[in-house]
Amino acid sequence: MSSGSSVDLLHLDPATWQPQPLHAGDRVWLETNCYIDVWAELLPALGHPAEAALAFTVLQDFEGDHFTFFKFPLEDLQALFGLAVQELAIYDTVEAHTLEQLHRGRPVLIEVDSHWLLDTGPTTYRKGHVKTTVAAIALDTAQRRFGYFHNTGYHVVSGDDYDGLFKAPPAQGMFPYVEFVKRGQVALSGQALVAASLGLLHGHLKHRPTINPIAAWRSALPEHFERLAARDMDYFHLYAFNLPRQLGANFEMLGTYLQWLGANGQAGLAEAAAAGRRIAEATKALQFQLARMANRRKFDATKLQLAPIEADYDLIVATLVARMG
């Protein structure tokens, strides 16, 4: 392992760090899921426009019990930005391996217990135990300080929280899943980046869902409502995260991607971009409606306005298929 007990890749200050564009205050879904949110902050911090890597959002599908937990494909990040993301083999402590990779200039993505993350606030900090992913940027083992990206910002923990993250032994020898980001390959920019992103979009469109995923969800709602009626509100919150939130956040990202293409010389996408934003807004309203139903223990699928969301999905796909040939 490398010598030295501390390293700071980017020398960031959590007090002055401003959320990046994909976490701007006017977003409908300010937070999406832990993996998307980490890269939404990390990519711009490394000098790359995260919007260019959002072509994969056309793949969003209804998976029967959830909407796709959408994530940046690692192959796309390498093709666009020269970032090679690999699994980090953990056989020593996570702390030691993280320090080694940071000394090599490589951010490290770690699955951690949000119980020890101060930025999770009143939801899980020192209360619940929820798995989440952070991007390690700075580590000082002597001072017990850890700087990382999580959710919409850059944060630092220390003391007992540091010990909770790095000093507790893994349960029954089960190490967390950890990745490291190898940098140094050539990153694309300008029109070369736009062309490569369009190429990825063309490829992803070939693997889009065969049926409208919102229509598929509509068909499954009666069965889902039976489960929701039999479970408590904690179950509902998990349901809301994995269905309306993943659906809405994904299509807000797709709308943002189409806006980015439009701003980079690709005409004819404004209407589809607006449709992505409408899906985001409609699913946020739908989530609140579902919450009221869950509180009252009365579920009625006919009260949900899903037809406009289905129509906007069809508009986006038709536009992209026509645009991409």
Image (tube, rainbow, N blue to C red):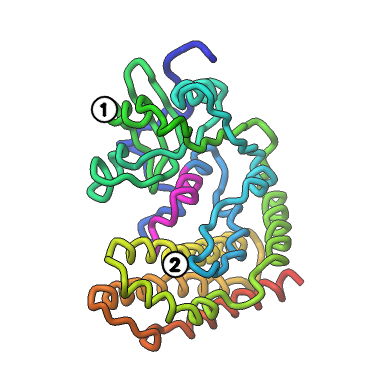
Quick one: label 1, few (<14), some, or many (20+) residues within 10 Å?
A: few
* Span of residues in magenta: 27-41
Which three-letter amino acid code belongs to the residue tagged 1? Asp
- Say whether residue 175 is left or right of residue 203: left
Relative image position of residue 145 (x, y in whole percent): 34, 25
Residue at position x 37%, y 72% in the image: 227
- Could you say which disc has been placed on residue 243 in the image? 2
Alpha carbons under labels 2 and 1: distance apart: 35 Å
Which residue lies most toward the bottom here? 302
Q: Secondary structure at mark 1?
A: helix
Q: Amino acid at mark 2?
A: Leu
Determine the residue positioned at 38% across, 19% down. 141
On the rendered image, what quadrant is the C terminus found in?
bottom right
- Between 68 and 149, the one lying in front of the other is 68
The image shows residue 265, relative to residue 226, as above or below, that is: above
Q: In which quadrant of the rendered view does residue 324 lie?
A: bottom right
Tell me, for residue 160, which label it has, or none: 1
